[in-house]
Amino acid sequence: MSMRLRLKADGRVVELRDGQEFPVQPVASAVEPPPAEAGSLAVRDLRRRACLTQMEFAAKLGVPVETIRNWEQGKRAPRGPARALLAVIAHAPDTVFQALAKA
C-alpha cells in the first residue's frame, strides 16, 4: 500500500489515511533554519527597524496586512519581486519608501 501525501497551502505535508490528515514530520536540518523561519525574522526585523506597524508596513508596500502577518509568522515566505523589494528595503529603506509613496 502506498502513502498518499498532500502539500498544504501553508507548506505542511500531511498523509491522507481513512479520510483524515496526519502530519508528516519533516527531517530537521542541523545546518540552517527553515527558509520560512529565516524569512519571517527578516521581515519582522525590517519592519521594526523602520518603526512601522504591520498595517503601516503593508500599506507602504501595497500588500494586504495578512501577507505581512503570514511572512512574519512563517506561514509563507516572500518570493520573487517581494523578496527583491525587501532586499532593497534592507539597504535603503527611506529611498524605497519615498519612491513607493510617489507611485
Image: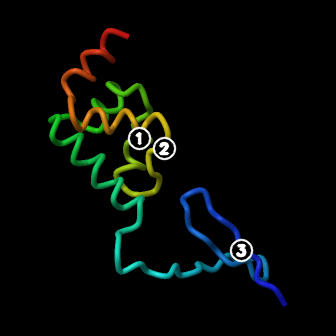
Type of amino acid under label 3: Leu
Please tell me which residue lies in front, 103 or 68: 103
The answer to whether residue 64 is above or below residue 66 is: above
Q: Residue furthest right?
A: 1
Please tell me which residue lies in front, 71 or 69: 71
The answer to whether residue 9 is above or below residue 51 is: below
Type of amino acid under label 2: Arg
Q: Secondary structure at mark 3?
A: strand
Distance from Cα at disc 2 to Cα at disc 1: 5 Å
Q: Secondary structure at mark 2?
A: loop
The structure residue drawn at horizontal position 30% and vertical position 33%, both measured from the top left corner, is 88
Residue 85: horizontal and vertical position, in percent? Answer: 37, 33
The structure residue drawn at horizontal position 65% and vertical position 65%, both measured from the top left corner, is 7
Crowd class of label 3 (few under 14; some 14 to 19; many from 20; radius 10 Å): some
Please tell me which residue lies in front, 18 or 31: 31
Q: Is residue 1 left or right of residue 30?
A: right
Marks 2 & 1, CB-CB < 8 Å contact: yes
Type of amino acid under label 1: Arg
Locate residue 91: give its quadrant.
top left
The structure residue drawn at horizontal position 37% and vertical position 56%, both measured from the top left corner, is 73
The structure residue drawn at horizontal position 36% and vertical position 80%, both measured from the top left corner, is 30
Foreground label between 2 and 3: 2
> Which label's residue is closer to the chain start, 1 or 3?
3
The answer to whether residue 97 is above or below residue 11 is: above
Residue on which disc 1 sits: 83
Q: Secondary structure at mark 1?
A: helix
Residue on which disc 2 sits: 79
Considering the image in quadrants, where does the C terminus appear? top left
Residue on which disc 3 sits: 5
> Which label's residue is closer to the chain start, 2 or 3?
3
Residue 3: horizontal and vertical position, in percent? Answer: 76, 83
Distance from Cα at disc 2 to Cα at disc 3: 24 Å
